[in-house]
Image: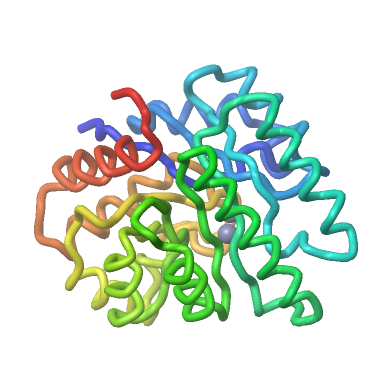
Amino acid sequence: MIMRLIDTHCHIYSQEFDADRAEMIGRAENEGIKMMLMPAIDSSTNEAMFRVEKDYPGRCISMMGLHPCSVKETLRDELLIVQKNFEERKFIAVGETGLDFYWDLSYVEQQKQAFQQQIEWALQYDIPVVIHSRNSIDACIEMISQNQKGKLKGVLHCFSGSLEQAKKIIDLDFYLGIGGVLTFKKSGLDAVVEQLDLNNIILETDAPYLAPVPFRGKRNECSYLKFVAEKLAEIKKMPVDEVANITTANAEKLFQLKN
Ligand SMILES: [Zn+2]
Ligand SMILES: [Zn+2]
């Protein structure tokens, strides 16, 4: 059975796919993935992202933003490049932005500044903001909360937090992006997701990272999204095509995609 799916977060312009990108996208489409949404990282990867978007029109679609791990002393210049891109054309979302307190704590204040600026662009252009968090969910919730005056929309991608954090994010009118971590033993995410309404969930791979079981530890690719959908169906005790339909409709609504 072919599902109707959208991979809402995949870095398929990454060098990891340079050798077999067309085949990889072909495999994804064979699994029913009709659209692949690509979060930006920084100015060093934009060109590759735009090239993939041009090669697969209407199928691979770019966001625009600055990843928190790319926030360094070059912050000002990087944000000017993001701003220029927003002035030149439309994007489906701002991102990925957010806070990453795992790798490096030397630019926490700058990460917050960059995040705040990108939230403001999301509001200005009326598009969703795609948020990355690592060791920083509560700080991300705080930032969303401060800016949520009824108009801000988006997703906390690769969510792996607690039920309490999930509920706060949903109360702020945000979606939870669920990916391969759901299939990891001992992640605890299955018990959290069991308590959540599917209407608050969208699916993602974050390829080439975080491959689901049975490919954990290997390069992730968009076709593996089906393993996330199947796990979610198992947890929710629902048919997998129903899980696919609901989460895909959520993605279409959030990113204002035509179905
Ligand atoms: Zn991320
Ligand atoms: Zn990402």
Query: Could you say where residue 25 lies in the image, as x and y percent from the top left?
Result: 52, 29
Could you tell me which quadrant the N terminus lies in? top left
* Number of numbered discs overlaid on the protein picture: 0
Question: Residue 230, relative to residue 194: is it above or below?
Answer: above
Answer with the quadrant where ligand 2 appears in the image.
bottom right
Question: Residue at position x 29%, y 24% from top?
Answer: 259
Question: Residue 249, relative to residue 110: is it above or below?
Answer: above
Q: Is residue 83 left or right of residue 219?
A: right
Q: Is residue 211 left or right of residue 155?
A: right
Query: Could you say where residue 174 lies in the image, as x and y percent from the top left?
Result: 35, 59
Q: How is the image coloured?
A: rainbow
Query: Could you say where residue 81 lies in the image, as x and y percent from the top left?
Result: 79, 41
Question: Residue at position x 61%, y 57% from top?
Answer: 97
Q: Nearer the viewer, residue 130 or 35?
A: 130
Q: Nearer the viewer, residue 156 or 125?
A: 125
Query: Could you say where residue 124 lies in the image, as x and y percent from the top left?
Result: 54, 42
Q: Locate residue 226: give its quadrant.
A: top left
Question: Residue 117, relative to residue 190: is it above or below?
Answer: above
Q: Nearer the viewer, residue 38 or 205?
A: 38
Question: Residue at position x 51%, y 71% from top?
Answer: 143
